[in-house]
């Protein structure tokens, strides 16, 4: 799931009371009982100035980002990401239930995707990454491969439940034989693959290109040598034994790849200059005249923009 923190929502309820603790004896009563009440003041004191400052600042960052880039966020890409997340977790109903357990709604999750897209735009704007530069990357990545695999993992320190090398290789060869005899790849992946991230989806690894992927060398050398509907022999990597299939391949349009290319460019910009986010936010805050009358919040904003704020 995307980066949401369960604490944000309950804390957000009391953001409006920053600095109000001294305005009355206790402020608005949230809960009453014979044992006493829970008031705004109680909540603020319980949360603490530091966490409250972080949350208030985070909310303001979201506000200015979404206002700045409201007309540039690719809504189609947001919808596609949401659809992909729902499919990954077993459909819309199951996904909504999972979000509910974390204290969120589908709309809040979607807002998070928009904020992430706006952050990407902010970083790329500051770095000077425009469509012309993205198109240079596009030319290297436009030919896309839709891959799937079946992994028979080998026992190791990080995977004590894997098979021995000999057993894993034999099992992979047996699965390959079933494929050659007409077995369905997705079905065999669900039944045999040890890659828990995608086994239930028939081993689906999504779309990638030769230039932009996260696969180890042995895997990518075998995968991108295949053409549509072709299946590899057994391929050994540090993870175990794989059988790889190219489900489809195509030349994608620039608009299709632009969101992913932009996100990749932003990631590279941050790797190159770890202070770029703070510098870009400082410029944005100046543009929007962001300030606070609360000394704790103001101090936190200052430290964040200087890159010295403590990590949440």
Image (cartoon, rainbow, N blue to C red):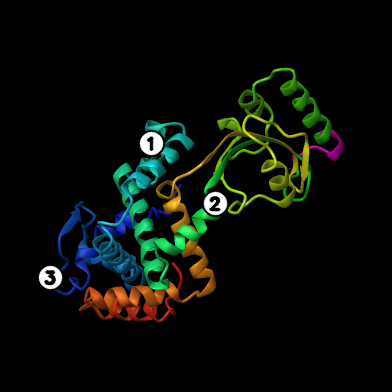
Q: Quadrant of residue 7?
A: bottom left
Task: Name the residue rendered at 35%, 73% in the picture.
Answer: 281
Q: Tell me residue 29's x, y (percent).
A: 17, 57
Between tags 1 and 2, which lies in front?
2
Q: Secondary structure at mark 2?
A: helix
Q: Secondary structure at mark 3?
A: loop
Residue 164 covered by magenta stretch: yes
Residue hosting label 1: 97
Task: Name the residue rendered at 49%, 69% in the picture.
Answer: 269
| Callout 2 crowding tier (Cα within 10 Å): few <14, some 14–19, many ≥20 | many
- N-terminal-most mark, 2 or 3: 3
Between tags 2 and 3, which lies in front?
2
Residue hosting label 2: 141
Q: CA distance from mark 2 to mark 3?
A: 61 Å
Q: Tell me residue 6's x, y (percent).
A: 39, 53
Task: Name the residue rendered at 38%, 36% in the picture.
Answer: 97
23 lies left or right of 159: left
111 lies left or right of 26: right
Residue at the extreme top? 182
- N-terminal-most mark, 1 or 2: 1
| Callout 3 crowding tier (Cα within 10 Å): few <14, some 14–19, many ≥20 | few
Above or below 260: residue 19: below
Above or below 12: residue 170: above
Residue hosting label 3: 24
- N-terminal-most mark, 3 or 1: 3
Contact flag, marks 1 and 2 (Cβ < 8 Å): no
Q: Tell me residue 22's x, y (percent).
A: 17, 75
- Magenta span covers which residues? 161-167
Residue 194 covered by magenta stretch: no
């Amino acid at each position: 799931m995307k980066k949401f923190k369960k604490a944000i929502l309950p804390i957000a309820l009391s953001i409006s009371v920053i600095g109000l603790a001294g305005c009355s004896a206790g402020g608005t009563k949230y809960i009453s009982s014979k044992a006493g009440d829970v008031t705004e003041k109680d909540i603020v004191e319980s949360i603490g100035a530091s966490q409250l400052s972080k949350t208030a600042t985070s909310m303001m960052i979201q506000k200015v980002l979404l206002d700045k880039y409201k007309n540039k966020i690719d809504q189609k890409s947001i919808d596609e990401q949401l659809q992909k997340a729902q499919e990954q977790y077993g459909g819309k109903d199951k996904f909504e239930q999972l979000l509910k357990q974390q204290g969120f709604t589908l709309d809040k999750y979607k807002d998070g995707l928009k904020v992430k897209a706006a952050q990407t735009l902010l970083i790329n704007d500051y770095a000077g990454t425009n469509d012309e530069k993205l198109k240079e990357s596009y030319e290297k990545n436009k030919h896309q491969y839709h891959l799937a695999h079946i992994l028979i993992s080998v026992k190791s320190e990080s995977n004590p439940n894997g098979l021995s090398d000999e057993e894993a290789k034999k099992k992979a060869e047996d699965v390959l034989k079933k494929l050659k005899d007409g077995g369905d790849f997705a079905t065999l992946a669900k039944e045999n693959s040890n890659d828990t991230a995608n086994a239930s989806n028939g081993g689906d690894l999504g779309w990638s290109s030769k230039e932009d992927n996260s696969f180890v060398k042995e895997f990518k050398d075998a995968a991108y040598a295949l053409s549509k509907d072709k299946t590899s022999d057994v391929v050994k990597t540090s993870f175990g034994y794989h059988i790889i299939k190219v489900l489809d391949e195509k030349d994608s349009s620039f608009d299709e790849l632009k969101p992913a290319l932009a996100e990749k460019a932003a990631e590279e910009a941050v790797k190159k200059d770890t202070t770029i986010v703070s510098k870009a936010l400082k410029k944005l805050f100046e543009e929007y005249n962001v300030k606070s009358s609360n000394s704790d919040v103001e101090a936190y904003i200052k430290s964040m923009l200087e890159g010295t704020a403590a990590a949440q």
